[in-house]
Amino acid sequence: MEVNQLPILSNVQVSARYWHMVVSAPGLVNRIQPGQFFNILCETTFPFLRRPFSIYRINKEEETIEFLYLVQGDGTKKMTEFKAGEKVDVFGPLGVGFTLEKDWETVLLLARGVGIATLAALAQEASNQNKKCIAILSARSHNDLLATETLQGLGAEVYKVTEEDGNSGVEYVEQLIENILAEQRVDAGFTCGSKRLSKLLQAVTRKYIIPSQIALEEHMACGMGACFACVCDIRSENATQSVRVCTEGPVFDLDKVVMA
Ligand code: FES
């Protein structure tokens, strides 16, 4: 991990609440795993705010990385002021990313909100490895389902559920997953972006004994294991262990995560 000043190629608003930033990262693109994150310096004057952002897309041919981010606080508001041609200070890649086992043929992604961006990078890697990807994307509204076309472009079978359509409740999503599992074999599950959907996936994958992983989105400060702002509980053999999401995660075995 390292700090880099990366040239911004574009930084544009793509919906009411989301922005998309593309940066040139020739030295980094081959060293990033989906699920890892960068700590980006959002506020370049005091108090020098850094915020964690997962990677949305890695373009190895053009040597760029992309971030799809939700504007929701001071840091992300400042980021919207970044202009193409300027440089952005990024620290990373940080943390442990997703694992895709060689013999997995079909994977199920369950993502909500900005978690969709995190799983989009995984869908890209799954597609590179010729794995089939089934994605259930949940959001407040259709406007927030930004990665749908990206995922479909990667060949994913996409199901959309939104509050707007009244079909994003846990019971509906549970039935949707049950239907998918009744029709086809799924080798692994992945989730990000919603506690209630993560709990659901944890329950379903336990029931069907399917390995599953989660990218946790804890509040982070240093991003490098020093401040313990990001601690969560993980079950080990017979005990519960507190771990730092920024260094031991953010990706964990979903079965082991203690859901609050
Ligand atoms: Fe500081 Fe994880 S954010 S230890």
Image (cartoon, rainbow, N blue to C red):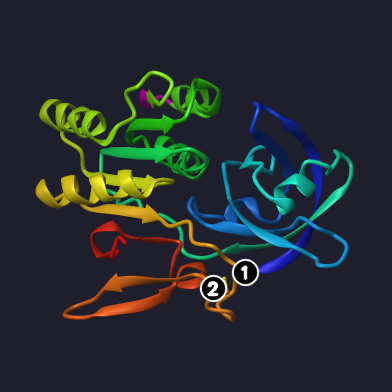
Kindly indicate the quadrant of the structure image that contains residue 20: top right
Q: CA distance from mark 2 to mark 1?
A: 6 Å
Kindly indicate the quadrant of the structure image that contains residue 240: bottom left
Mark 2 Cβ and ligand 1 under 8 Å apart: yes
Report the predominant secondary structure element of the magenta stretch: strand
Q: Is residue 216 above or below residue 71?
A: below
Q: Quadrant of the C terminus?
A: bottom left
**Contact? badges 2 and 1 (CB < 8 Å):** yes
Residue under label 1: 221
Asked if one can make out residue 52 in the rendered structure from this viewpoint, the answer is: yes
Residue under label 2: 229
What amino acid is labelled 1 in the image?
Answer: Ala
Q: Residue at x 43, y 21 (%)?
A: 164
Q: Residue at x 54, y 62 (%)?
A: 219
Mark 1 Cβ and ligand 1 under 8 Å apart: yes
Question: What x and y, as percent, mark residue 87?
Answer: 85, 51
